[in-house]
Image: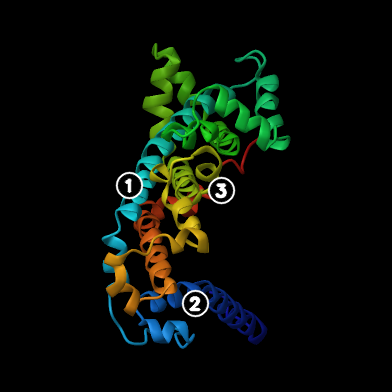
Amino acid sequence: MLKKSVGSKAFDGFNYIFLGLLALSCLIPIIHIIAVSFSNKAATSANLVTLWPVGFHTLAYERVLSSWDFVRAFFVSMGRVLVGVSVNMFIICVTAYPLSKESNQLKGRTFLVWLLVFPMLFKGGLIPTYLVVRDVGLLNSFWALIWPGAVPIFSIILMMNFYRSLPKSLSEAAMIDGAGHFNILFKIFLPLSKPGIATLTLFEAVGHWNEWFMGMIYLNDQAKFPLQTYLRQMLLPSFAEGKITASDIEYVKMLSDKNFTAAQLVIAIIPILCIYPFVQKYFVKGLVIGSVKG
């Protein structure tokens, strides 16, 4: 083992400090929101809360969890993630497989790839997209959150290149044994693509969970809002003011809008944080999918 020089040790120390500060800068806003959610109204209104709760209580969470609007929006988002990610990953896997073949195996492959890449670079625009969603009857329905983004082109290209990095001898040997393309895809390619699938599943899940714009432009009924669209509306004074009723008077005495909103934000990030431990072992390897061959 080579002994590190003083300059090398200093450089490593600088990297550790810099990356530690960078990680801390990402954590501080989250810690602050958590502290606000557990603080009392007076301290929050006076901006006395920093990284530790002042006047600790859990009334904000009791209020959030007793709000049917929040619970309903939460389950809408859960359903959106489950259905949307399933649709996305099915399309990604079955579309990337034929495109991973050589041009002599799939006629017109180059044209099909460019057919996918072109709309990724040149969008149709918001108004034409809205008109299409309206004309196919998806407005104000759950599927308006799923189908407009059902074909994630960038993820298809990543998975296509991941398939192309697998040894060709595997599929050739399977075809000699009489296996068809569906058997090769589902019994050989997909089991070997767990890192890529886990990473893209995480990306698509985070995208569906955090996306709020579709709910705002495609849904008219607030009862059908996903969680992020609901939370955005809660930040608007005109929406929040209408939420206070006579039955909420006890909560109003002890909670401010900041407490209530902070508690909702904390609950909203919990599902995504729960996903990471299960895909972490694939995540680092999956980050380089599609970077070997093109």
Tag 1 near tag 2, CB within 8 Å: no
Q: Earlier in the sequence, mark 1 or mark 2?
A: 2
Q: Residue at x 37, y 84 (%)?
A: 53
Q: Which residue is mark 3?
A: 288
Query: What's the residue type where badge 1 is placed?
Result: Phe
Q: Position of residue 200 (x, y in %)?
A: 48, 43
Q: Which residue is mark 1?
A: 75
Q: Nearer the viewer, residue 219 or 195?
A: 219
Q: Is residue 100 visible?
A: no
| Label number found at residue 171 | none
Q: Which residue is mark 2?
A: 28
Label 3 neighbour load within 10 Å: few <14, some 14-19, many 20+: some
Query: What's the residue type where badge 3 is placed?
Result: Val
As measured in the structure, the alpha-carbon distance from the residue carrying label 1 to the one carrying label 3 is 33 Å
Q: Nearer the viewer, residue 94 or 11?
A: 94
Relative to 106, is 268 above or below? below
Q: Residue at x 63, y 21 (%)?
A: 102
Q: Nearer the viewer, residue 16 or 254?
A: 254
Relative to 85, is 138 above or below? above
As measured in the structure, the alpha-carbon distance from the residue carrying label 1 to the one carrying label 2 is 28 Å
Q: Quadrant of the C terminus?
A: top right
Q: Is residue 27 left or right of residue 99?
A: left
